[in-house]
Image: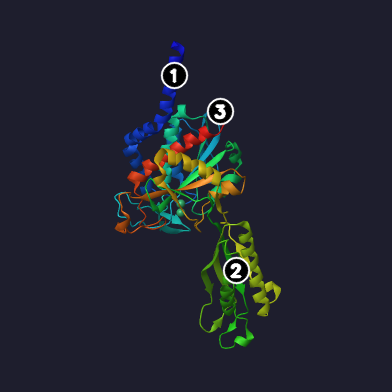
Amino acid sequence: MRNSLMLLLLLSFHFLSAQNYSLQIESLLKKEQSTNLDCYKNLHAHPELSTKEFNTAAYLRKTIQSYGYEIIDSLGYQSFAAVIKNGNGPTILYRTEMDGLPVKEETSLPYASTVVSIKDNEPFSVMHACGHDVHMTTWLGIAKVLSQFKNNWKGTLVMLAQSAEETAQGAKKLITSPNFNLIPQPTYQLAIHNNGDLKAGEVGFCDGYAMAAVDMINITIYGKGGHGAAPQNAIDPIVLSAQYINEIQTIVSRNLSPNDPAIVTVGAIHGGTAGNIIPNQVILKLTIRSYSKEARETIINRLKEIGDNLAAAAGLSKDKFPLYEILDMSIPSLYNNAELGKKIKNIIEHKFGAVVIKQVKPVMLGEDFGVYGQQLSNIPSYLLWMGTLNPEIKNTDHPVIYSPHSSHFAPFAEECIPRNISIISNCLIELFKSVN
Ligand SMILES: [Zn+2]
Ligand SMILES: [Zn+2]
């Protein structure tokens, strides 16, 4: 009798402590609020450009090491992983990006960036305009919580700090770096991104294709230069380019299924020097966005077919057919695993209420987190959209909303950072428990 009473007491204590950890995280975050905000403001005021996040990486590395994590270094550019092993259980990888953007900040915040860096031999103002400073502060906060609540989970947590997300170089470099093999194989992979349309504390879900594959292509259209007053002796690459730009608009509208969205945008056209000279060539710069591999292949094949055939029709020989250069900036689309999404949704609904869960439509922006989920393996991955708006704002207020990459982008850090840390820490702890 006495023993069973003891057991009952122990079990109820265990049950209460399991339930209470969420409340304990909340009170820890209240205590840490000013430390976390100082960390955010410091990161915000000192952004570094892609591949050059030297001080940022050093700061993150030193801080997370002080929480008891072990570092796996040399993962390409400034990328590193911090690993904490806590008994037998699943392995979860959680990624942050570290880079700022070449944007001149116009927020007028007291901690606004005044950093000027050198890019391609030119001075450029730098700003954390994509909110990677929010992501990093959240990342450190989660790392601390998980290290302090080790009694509530079992497994291995891999905290990945990635260089050069904005230039689509970081993840590709990381998975091909020799030290990548030292990272334990994850059961799940998670990341977050700021969302300027959602309020702080709201979490946006988009199952399946959530962000697009990105390709940047330069195309040189050749011709035969000559006098602008004697076009009969020339083959005009300006006219050819105009035909080409119009014709490739039919790829999305005529060659792809309406259910398989894609974009072909010509963002730059460079050719010619004067009104009376027909130039030898014109250079076009394009971005291609797609979700499925089939759509991506169709677009690239059609760009070549249309270009080659127009060149032939203009009377150019094969050696003067266009030159197609796919730049080393391609990334695959980002695919959110629906089953993992459902698990996370259930955890958040149970802990924070259904009211914080929002459905978000897929976007044609790119994110190289997709590299981890699609190129190497079929490890279930999910990128959650996390709100940055002041939750006090009413829908009737019609606030001016600035999105990431705007020089005015100013997340409501006081609210979104503790919300992010709390939500993701709870998700991680429960995900660790959900896999045996
Ligand atoms: Zn960005
Ligand atoms: Zn970003």
**Labels 2, 1: front one:** 1
Q: Is label 1 or label 3 in front?
A: 1
Q: Disc 2 versus disc 3: distance between alpha carbons?
A: 51 Å
| Image side of residue 345 versus residue 402, left or right | right
Across and down, in percent, residue 119 comes to 46, 56
Q: Position of residue 16 (x, y in %)?
A: 41, 26
SS label for mark 3: loop
User: Can residue 216 be spotted in the picture?
Assistant: yes
Label 1 sits on what residue type? Leu
Which image quarter holds the N terminus?
top left
Mark 1: secondary structure: helix
Residue beneath the point at 58% across and 67% down: 252
In the picture, residue 141 is in which quadrant?
top left
Residue 160 is labelled as none
Q: Given the current orientation, which residue lies at the most extreme right position? A: 318
Which residue, given by chain and number where applicable, does mark 1 sit on? 8
Residue to which mark 3 is pinned: 88
